[in-house]
Image: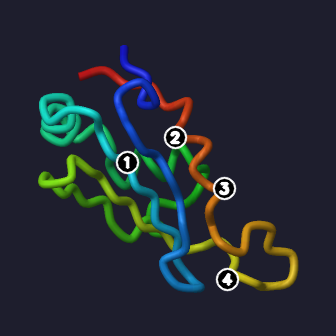
Amino acid sequence: MYKLIDQVDVVRSKNSGPYELTFDIMFKDKGHFDAFVDKQVMTEAVFAQLYGINVDMVKSVISFAPSKAVKITIVRPMASGDLGEKDIYGAQQHSPLLGFTYTL
């Protein structure tokens, strides 16, 4: 069993425009990144379950080998800056990933 936070250098979230959020996961080493991607640990369905959202809100889960990164983009539940929205920059949405555990 692996804890994601132990295998990565960076986990962050940010706006990808006013209607989307992007999550970046950047791994420490290529071997673990490759296994994570090859085993399809993070899919649209897994991310949706982790965040308690409908799978159709997950726009993409893509990997980028040169930076050992996985990028997930979702539809924001509420547009950035809307009345009642609590994280205008989208920079505080990555916390569920910090406790994510998985097997390879």
Q: Is residue 54 above or below residue 79?
A: above
Residue visible at 55% across and 74% down in the picture: 15
Q: Which mark is residue 97?
A: 2
Q: Are marks 1 and 2 in contact (CB under 8 Å)?
A: yes
Residue beneath label 1, please?
Answer: 25
How far apart, in angstroms, are the residues tagged by discs 2 and 3?
11 Å
Name the foreground residue: 12 vs 82: 12
**Which badge, 2 or 4, comes first in the chain's sequence?**
4
Residue visible at 78% across and 85% down in the picture: 82
Residue 11 % position (x, y): 46, 46
Q: Is residue 30 above or below residue 90?
A: above
How many numbered discs sit on the rendered protein? 4
**Which badge, 3 or 4, comes first in the chain's sequence?**
4
Amino acid found under the numbered disc labelled 4: Ala
Would you identify the image quadrant in which residue 60 lies? bottom left
Q: Secondary structure at mark 3?
A: loop
Task: Using a 10 Å C-alpha cutoff, classify the residue at mark 1 as few (fewer than 14 neighbours), some (14 to 19) or many (20 or more).
Answer: many
How far apart, in angstroms, are the residues tagged by discs 1 and 2?
9 Å
